[in-house]
Amino acid sequence: MALPQPRVATRKRFFGSATKTAHSRNSQGSGSPVVYRAGQSVPAKDWYAYQPGSFDYKVARGTENIDWLSYSPGSQEGLAKDPQPIPFQVVFSLSALPKGKFVLRLDAILRYRRPAAPRFEVNINGDIGTYQLVPQPAPELWWPTGGDGAGGLQFIGYESLEMVLPASYFRRGNNTLTVRCLDGFGLYYDALSLANDPSSAVPLVTAASVEPTIFFKNRDSGMVELGKVRVRSTRPIGRATLKILIGSTQVTKEIQQSEFGDVEATIEVPASETPLPVTLRIQGVKAPVFRETFVPRRRWKVYALPMEQADFGYNEVPSRTLE
């Protein structure tokens, strides 16, 4: 497949739902042809290039008029000014008919005062999918990213996410990739790239997991632990049945997925004190999509002590409060 030709995109901006576009940039690496690349997949290495109005200095030596802001706000922040988070766009052109596998890679820094990792929405020419970000703690990035003078920063993490996409989402000629953060706070882009391997096939499921949570429930049959099942797909799965075998217990769960990306389900597993083997199968896929060990979480006892505090003069004058 021939490498796409770079194209300068026009900038669009709307109050409350601003849209900004960036250059496409070609590069031939050691593997697949790179369709688009911005930044470096090295945590905070080029953090200081991310000043307001500039997504990355490597993108055509970016300026405010053609590149992104460093920060992508989510739907839970006042910066968006409305329930719709701000989308960012990349416009690029493919000179040949798309074939094989495309991989969109995101490297992001997440800095929160309250933990709320967003879902990352990807829109490729109208085909939409979402992925749940699960950043790993990265306290070593606190100083390189400027620290927090106000002292309220509670979490700093790093996320590297590879999204496998089929060629059917792309087309010869102009393509538009739009990304935004949903159901959480935003992120700082450290790098974003799109690569293509025209000779590779694209499976329906690229990743899956069955993870314990910290939550337990008492049932008539005994205590159960809540587990989270996540399946990552390249195309919408539709309606399907998940079969999870944990130790000798089999659990079934119905899912419904209308978009590609991540689909999640919560299951109840008989509480165990020891790790158990777990296997996940999905309807329509012959081989198991996940084999691992289910390690139960620690069971906590939480004690609550009711307290009441009266601030004299807060709601009424002290004399009335004392009465």
Image: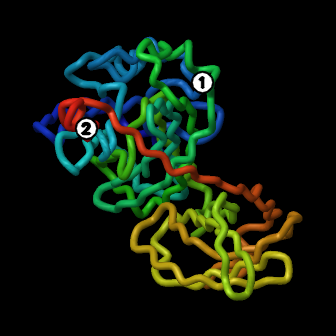
Placement of the C terminus among the 4 image quadrants:
top left
Secondary structure, mark 1, is loop
Secondary structure, mark 2, is helix
Coordinates of residue 14 in the picture (x, y in percent): 11, 38
Q: Write down the quadrant of residue 185 in the picture.
A: top left
The foreground one among 262 and 272 is 272
Coordinates of residue 20 in the picture (x, y in percent): 23, 34
Q: Nearer the viewer, mark 2 or mark 1?
A: 2
The residue depicted at 54 percent of the width and 55 percent of the height is: 164
Q: Write down the quadrant of residue 223 in the picture.
A: bottom right
The residue depicted at 14 percent of the width and 35 percent of the height is: 13
The residue depicted at 27 percent of the width and 19 percent of the height is: 53
- Residue found at the far right of this picture: 274
The residue depicted at 62 percent of the width and 80 percent of the height is: 242
The foreground one among 110 and 100 is 110
Local packing at callout 2 (Cα closer than 10 Å; few below 14, some 14-19, many 20+) is: few
Residue 165 visible in the displayed image:
yes
Coordinates of residue 287 in the picture (x, y in percent): 74, 77
Q: Is residue 7 above or below residue 279?
A: above
Marking on residue 42: 1
Amino acid of disc 1:
Val
Judge from the rendering whether residue 145 lies leftward or rightward of residue 96; answer left or right: right
Judge from the rendering whether residue 303 lies leftward or rightward of residue 149; answer left or right: right
Q: Which residue is mark 2?
A: 321
Amino acid of disc 2:
Thr
Label 2 – label 1 distance at C-alpha: 59 Å
Coordinates of residue 181 in the picture (x, y in percent): 36, 46
